[in-house]
Amino acid sequence: MCIRVLPPALIDLAMSLVRHHGYFGRYATWEEARQASVGYDSPHILEKVKLALLRVKNGESAYERDSVLFDRVEHAWPVLATLLWIAARNENRLNLLDFGGSLGSSYFQNRDFLQHLSEFRWNVVEQPAFVACGRRYFEDGHLKFYDTLDACLKQQSPDAILLSSVLQYLEQPYSLLSEILGKGVRYIIIDRTSFVRSGAERITVQKVPARIYKASYPAWFFEKRKFLAAFAEDYEMIAEVDVAGDRANIPSEFKGFIFSRRVPAVERECRPVQEALHA
């Protein structure tokens, strides 16, 4: 029996005919993909996420993800283990910057395992409408909202930056990475980020299942070697994680990474003097 392997383009076409959600197209530019999309900044989406997360905050549901409610928390164990590891290396303290963290979904997902820390701060950087909503309904003694990276860094000194399922939805993800790397934060945590299995990076349009909300938006699938090269000069990779649960209808994989900033030689030389002064 002869088994024929269909070309990727034909597979994509077949998938688009039978599926009403997933990732579709190979767009030459982000703008082309944007024109074929209905974006994430819809007020309807924000309202649906708000109502779902209020149920979690009030103890009526266990967990929210992309406005969908669950009766038990689905923990991202590698991320949680990393946060606890960072806190353990920092005198039981954790100050986190969660870039693109919605209304605090990951905070509510992980807070029960982190509230014992002697210091625990979770800072979300998001779109202005999300920030206004977050400040009104969700801020507490641990959770804060900011509309820019710099606004957060003026008030906070984060030990780590979390980028969970956010870079692939930015028009210029490498520009943001360059900006973040330039801030010199000790740890960077990447989670739920999409990569092609082979070939060049790809711009697609993600169509959200109608049962969640009616929307579509551009999405990247990165090339892993190019992505990791952005960190190579100033950061070393501590771990690479295959993300369970996230799937796509194109040949791809979802990954997580943990990076630690390389300590400059001058800083290493000054450490013994600083430790002696504080002894």
Image (spheres, helix red, strand yellow):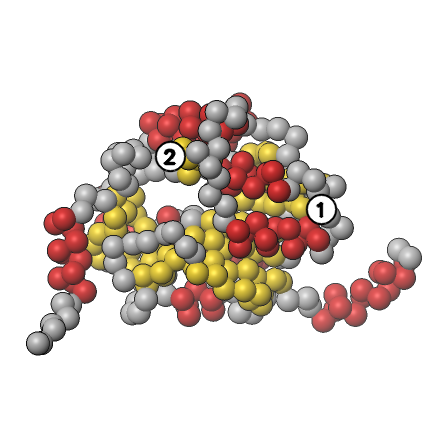
In the rendered image of this protein, does residue 68 appear above or below residue 229?
above
Query: Which residue lies at the image location 84% right of the left edge and 66% below the top edge?
Result: 272
Expressed as whole percent of the image width and height from the top left, the position of residue 95 reads: 65, 45
Q: Secondary structure at mark 1?
A: strand
Residue corresponding to mark 2: 68
Expressed as whole percent of the image width and height from the top left, the position of residue 70 reads: 42, 35
Query: Which residue lies at the image location 42% right of the left edge and 70% below the top edge?
Result: 225
**Image label count:** 2
Quarter where residue 138 is shown: top right
Could you tell me the amino acid type at mark 1?
Arg
Q: Could you classify mark 1 by the number of other residues whose Cα lies within 10 Å: few (under 14), some (14-19), or many (20 or more)?
A: many
Q: Nearer the viewer, residue 97 or 194?
A: 194
Instruction: Give the quarter of the figure containing the C terminus.
Output: bottom right
- First in residue order: circle 1 vs circle 2: 2
Image-based side of 277 in relation to 83, left or right: right
Query: Which residue lies at the image location 29% right of the left edge and 60% below the top edge?
Result: 202
Instruction: Give the quarter of the figure containing the N terminus.
Output: bottom left
Furthest-left residue in this view: 1
Query: Which residue lies at the image location 66% right of the left edge and 54% below the top edge?
Result: 86
Expressed as whole percent of the image width and height from the top left, the position of residue 32 reads: 23, 50
Image-based side of 277 in relation to 132, left or right: right
Image-based side of 212 in relation to 115, left or right: left
Residue corresponding to mark 1: 93
Quarter where residue 9 is shown: bottom left
In the rendered image of this protein, does residue 183 appear above or below residue 212?
below
Q: Could you classify mark 2 by the number of other residues whose Cα lies within 10 Å: few (under 14), some (14-19), or many (20 or more)?
A: some
Could you tell me the amino acid type at mark 2?
Val
Pointer 1 with pointer 2, Cβ within 8 A? no
Q: Which dot, 1 or 2, sits closer to the camera? A: 2
Image-based side of 261 in relation to 209, left or right: right
Q: CA distance from mark 1 to mark 2?
A: 31 Å
Expressed as whole percent of the image width and height from the top left, the position of residue 229 reads: 47, 69
